[in-house]
Image (cartoon, rainbow, N blue to C red):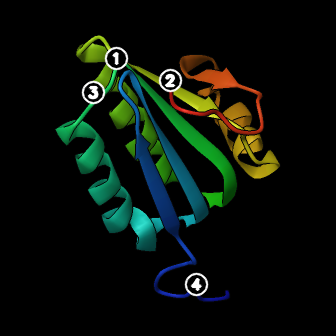
């Protein structure tokens, strides 16, 4: 079984707007990237906006732990009256959401990129 590099080429960018924020994720969302992914979510929780756009066009792999993390973020935002919208899903992410049956839980935009409002 091949070993993934420690960072799994994970990178992210957060852009805060007045009413929304956009998070662009890139790389593999796997066990090794859960710590930096959680740091990203903590930044979102520290300065939430009514709408959070999550651009997943650069995500090449989505593992179960990262999927659980996304579900937890969605629940946290929803409990506070905010919305998480997934956008620009890579085919790998779209397949994982469909196969696991959680696609209907998320608001999904098909646009290639979503700019903050």
Mark 3 or mark 2, which has the lower sequence index? 3
Badge 4 is on which residue?
Answer: 4
What percent of the width, then of the height, locates residue 71? 42, 34
Mark 4 or mark 1, which has the lower sequence index? 4
Q: Residues within 10 Å of mark 2 (few under 14, many from 20)?
A: few
Badge 2 is on which residue?
Answer: 117
- What is the C-alpha distance between the residues marked 3 and 2? 21 Å
- What is the C-alpha distance between the residues marked 1 and 2? 14 Å
- Name the side, left or right, on which 17 lies relative to 2: left
Asked which secondary structure carries label 3, the reply is: helix
Q: Residues within 10 Å of mark 3 (few under 14, many from 20)?
A: some
What percent of the width, then of the height, locates residue 62? 60, 55
Determine the residue located farthest toward the left in the rendered image: 46
Q: Residue at x 65, y 24 (%)?
A: 108
Mark drawn on residue 76:
3
State how many labels appear.
Answer: 4
Asked which secondary structure carries label 2, the reply is: loop
């Amino acid at each position: 079984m091949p070993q993934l590099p420690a960072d799994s080429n994970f990178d992210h960018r957060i852009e805060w707007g007045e009413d929304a924020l956009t998070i662009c994720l890139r790389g593999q969302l796997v066990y090794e990237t859960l710590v930096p992914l959680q740091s990203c979510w903590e930044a979102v929780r520290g300065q939430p906006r009514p709408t959070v756009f999550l651009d997943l066009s650069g995500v090449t792999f989505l593992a179960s732990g990262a999927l659980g993390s996304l579900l937890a973020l969605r629940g946290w935002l929803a409990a506070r009256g905010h919305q998480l919208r997934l956008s620009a899903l890579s085919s790998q992410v779209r397949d994982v959401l469909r196969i696991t049956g959680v696609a209907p839980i998320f608001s999904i935009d098909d646009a290639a990129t979503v700019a903050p409002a």
